[in-house]
Amino acid sequence: MDFPAFTEAAPLTALEIEALRSLYTTLQDLRHEYESARALSHRFYRLEETAQVYTHGRALTHHPDALHRLGILSDRYERGVGMLAWRHASAATVLGISILDRLVGGRPAMTAAAITALCEEPTLGRLREALSIPCTDLLVAREPDFRDRYEDARRGLLRSVEGVVENAAQIGDGVPEDAAELWAGRLSQFDRLDTDPLYDGILGPLLPFADHFPNEVDWYLRQSRKGALPQPI
């Protein structure tokens, strides 16, 4: 899906549009690269398992050893791409929800400083706050079936964010155990290389969820101009 062509008549500032476009286009590449990195990592481990079978009992194991090293390197790359994708997907989610929420609520445009801040990785608490807004309050221009699908996704992501905090509290290694401190921090602050990535289980569904907000903003504005909303802007 392409980034929408917002017209000058849209009640958005140039910076709001630029911010939406910047994170949207960035996520397109990061999403594909993350999928490729995951596939590469899985491929090396499958090859290693095969090599271990045919070299079993032999004195020289250069092949499985090399593939094992490649697997470790690919894991590191996958994790780096995953963290980069998390930072941008979480920011795109909060930015998109914030802009759509202010349009639906009829509030004035945000300041340049506020928009710039929303383009950075949010705290887990800020992400939870954004995901706590029901889709019935955001996707007012959509049919009920469409809203229900995204509402299910929203609730799942909200549960996953809460799971991130629960998992982070058990890491140790300088990561706080207090929930309030964890909600006030960012996932990237608490992730540790010797544990499973904290974004496991949430990044996959968050990427497509974050992806759809520029088009939801565009759809809302189109329907509003047609007078197809309960309270047109």
Image (tube, rainbow, N blue to C red):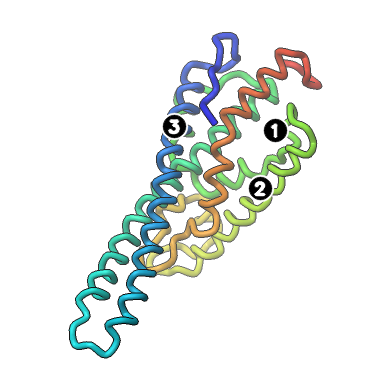
- Relative horizontal placement of residue 144, taking residue 233 as reference (left or right): right
Picture disc at residue 17: none
Residues under labels 2 and 1: Cα distance? Answer: 14 Å
Q: Which one is in front in this view, the residue at disc 3 or the one at disc 1?
A: 3
- Relative horizontal placement of residue 103, taking residue 202 as reference (left or right): right
Q: Residue beneath label 3, please?
A: 25
Using the image, determine if residue 41 lies above or below residue 88: below
Residues under labels 3 and 1: Cα distance? Answer: 23 Å
Residue reaching furthest to the top:
9
> Dot 2: within a 10 Å radius of its alpha carbon, few (fewer than 14), some, or many (20 or more) residues?
some
> Dot 1: within a 10 Å radius of its alpha carbon, few (fewer than 14), some, or many (20 or more) residues?
many
Relative image position of residue 225 (x, y in whole percent):
70, 13
Of callouts 2 and 1, which one flags the residue occurring earlier in the amino acid sequence? 1
Q: Residue at x 50, y 50 (%)?
A: 184
Q: Residue at x 41, y 68 (%)?
A: 195
Q: Nearer the viewer, residue 180 or 7?
A: 7
Determine the image quadrant of residue 53. bottom left
| Residues tagged 2 and 3 counted as in contact (Cβ below 8 A) | no
Q: Residue beneath label 1, please?
A: 138
Using the image, determine if residue 126 lies above or below residue 169: above
- Relative horizontal placement of residue 208, taking residue 219 as reference (left or right): left
User: What is the three-letter code of the residue carrying label 1?
Assistant: Leu
Residues under labels 2 and 3: Cα distance? Answer: 22 Å
Quadrant placement of the N terminus: top right
Of callouts 2 and 3, which one flags the residue occurring earlier in the amino acid sequence? 3
| Residues tagged 3 and 1 counted as in contact (Cβ below 8 A) | no
Relative image position of residue 160 (x, y in whole percent):
59, 56
Q: Which one is in front in this view, the residue at disc 2 or the one at disc 1?
A: 2
Picture disc at residue 153: 2
User: What is the three-letter code of the residue carrying label 2?
Assistant: Ala
Quadrant placement of the C terminus: top right
> Dot 3: within a 10 Å radius of its alpha carbon, few (fewer than 14), some, or many (20 or more) residues?
few
